[in-house]
Image (cartoon, rainbow, N blue to C red):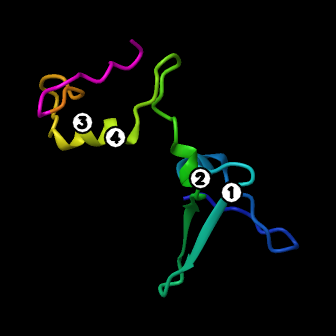
């Protein structure tokens, strides 16, 4: 355990080792929990990002996006890695493969 000094304004500077362990850096936030045994627990606060940030995260350049209907068809066919997920269960015309 290392000791850290408190400045005249009541601030402390956490050692780099502690910051790395918590996964925080400049501008990061920590939650401070006061425990009944007198200890203080620090936990990194992870920011929340809008759901829209996830859109397109798996898209490869040049691939066309699947429509909601195409995704629904693939999901309803119960595809689990066997066969072609884009071949409708009832037969009929196959949906074009992504990128081709």
Q: Nearer the viewer, residue 55 or 86?
A: 86
- In the rendering, at what x and y percent does residue 89 appear? 12, 33
Q: Nearer the viewer, mark 1 or mark 3?
A: 3
Mark 4 sits on what residue?
Answer: 69
Which residue corresponds to the image point at 58% horizontal and 58% vertical from the top-left? Answer: 48
Q: CA distance from mark 2 to mark 4?
A: 49 Å
Give SS at disc 4.
helix
Label whose residue precedes the other's in the sequence (2 or 4): 2
Disc 4, disc 3: CB below 8 Å? Answer: no
Of labels 1 and 4, earlier in sequence is 1
- In space, the residues marked 4 and 3 are separated at their CA atoms by 9 Å
Q: Which mark is residue 18?
A: 2
Residue stretch in magenta? 89-100
Q: Secondary structure at mark 2?
A: helix
Q: Are marks 2 and 1 in contact (CB under 8 Å)?
A: yes
The answer to whether the residues at label 2 and label 4 have Cβ atoms under 8 Å apart is no
Real-space CA distance between mark 1 and mark 4, rounded to the nearest whole angstrom: 52 Å
Residue 19: % across, % down: 62, 51
Q: Is residue 70 magenta?
A: no
The residue sitting at 38% across, 20% down in the picture is 98
Say whether residue 40 is left or right of residue 10: left
Task: Examine the rendered structure and indicate whether residue 67 appears above or below residue 26.
Answer: above
Q: Which residue is mark 1?
A: 14
Residue 10 falls in which quadrant of the image? bottom right
Which SS type dominates the magenta stretch? loop
Mark 2 vs mark 4, foreground winner is 4
Q: Is residue 89 above or below residue 25?
A: above
């Amino acid at each position: 355990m290392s000791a850290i000094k408190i400045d005249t304004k009541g601030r402390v500077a956490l050692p780099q080792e502690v910051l790395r362990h918590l996964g925080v850096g400049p501008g990061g936030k920590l939650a401070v929990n006061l425990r009944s045994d007198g200890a203080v627990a620090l936990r990194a606060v992870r920011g929340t990002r809008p759901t829209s940030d996830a859109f397109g995260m798996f898209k490869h350049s040049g691939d066309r996006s699947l429509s909601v209907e195409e995704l629904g068809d693939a999901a309803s066919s119960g595809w689990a890695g066997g066969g072609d997920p884009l071949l409708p269960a009832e037969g009929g015309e196959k949906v074009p493969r992504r990128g081709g």
